[in-house]
Amino acid sequence: MPFEQVMATTQGLNRSVEALAAVAACLRLRAEGLEAPLEVDRLVHEAADAAGVGPLDDLSVEQCQMALGAIRAFFRQAAELMDAPDRPCGWITDDATLLQSQGRASAMVAGLLASITPSMGDLADRLGRPGATLADLGTGVGWLAIAFARTHPEATVVGVDIAEGPLEMARANVIESGLDHRVALRSVDAAELPYEDEFDLVWVPGPFLSAEVLPDVLDNCLRALRPGGWVVFGRYAGPPDPLAAILIDLRVVRSGGHPWTTDEAASLLADHGFVDVATPERTWSGPMIFTVGRRP
């Protein structure tokens, strides 16, 4: 491809990068009460409007934080791909901003799952009873565990991870949220879960689990669930176009995961003893899709 064509194409793509940054700036201004210089404020809002993201007045602070977290997390990962395309695959980062942003973005999973819970047998009733328990595997900095606790006020949430740095941040986030009496954090490997008949729901973050380790994780989930409890295997999703699919696979592989198809995800759960396996229709714009299964 000629240099001039390369420049024309990349500059066209760069417009999307800068537009997304303008949207993120608007979210920060709203969520954090920042005050930009008047001309900057006007132009970032004009850019966001032109990009199709209209006024944000209807969003809560929490919703702004989740949307901003997704943008920031993808931005940081994209920049790291550019800076270190030769690094080994795996979720290996000490970037506090990336970790907190990824955690903020993951908090949207709690609301998305609540929207499909009525289709998952008696799970809604289970999670509404005192004594209900949920497990958040790969809890990271804890924002999803916190969101689970807020969404299901009768439940206790156990967040597990093996990375001590993120767990330390998670402890601070949980205490700051005032939910340390209902969110417990454990330094545990998801491939070696020590629980049995313990949980009504287990969240499995597919993008961060390798094809080699996932079978052990699913076996442990089956044992850790109470009879009739549910596992939710989450995967990244995006717009239905070829470039988006390639970029999602790239992000997953660099995060240490495997880009499972929907059919493959369903077969995995069925092969490891789960029943009523299904992939609920994705009726939301959040970048996730779920395959669910129940312990008999």
Image (cartoon, rainbow, N blue to C red):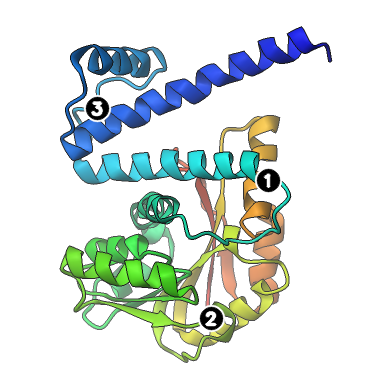
Q: Is 87 drawn above or below residue 58 in the view shown?
A: below
- Which label sits on residue 250? 1
Residue at point 46%, 22% (across, down): 18
- Which label sits on residue 84? none
Residue at point 65%, 80% (across, down): 216
Q: Which quadrant, please, contains the N terminus?
A: top right
Q: Is 63 drawn above or below residue 235 in the view shown?
A: above
Amino acid at the residue labelled 3: Leu
Residue at point 61%, 14% (across, down): 11
**Along the polypeptide, which appears first: circle 2 or circle 1?**
2
Label 3 environment density (alpha carbons within 10 Å; few <14, some 14–19, many ≥20): some
Residue 234 rendering spot, x and y as whole percentages: 53, 58
Marks 2/1: CA–CA distance = 25 Å
Picture quadrant where residue 154 is located = bottom left
Q: Is residue 296 visible?
A: no
Label 2 environment density (alpha carbons within 10 Å; few <14, some 14–19, many ≥20): some
**Residue closest to the far front:** 83
- Which label sits on residue 56? 3
Marks 3/2: CA–CA distance = 40 Å
Residue 90 rendering spot, x and y as whole percentages: 64, 61
**Along the polypeptide, which appears first: circle 3 or circle 1?**
3
**Along the polypeptide, which appears first: circle 3 or circle 2?**
3
Q: Give the SS element for disc 2.
A: loop
- Which label sits on residue 189? 2
Q: Are marks 2 and 1 in contact (CB under 8 Å)?
A: no
Q: Give the SS element for disc 3.
A: loop
Indicate which label's residue lies in the foreground, 3 or 1. Answer: 1
Q: Nearer the viewer, residue 88 or 115?
A: 88
Q: Give the SS element for disc 1.
A: helix
Picture quadrant where residue 201 is located = bottom left
Q: Is residue 144 visible?
A: yes
Say left or right for 136 vs 90. left
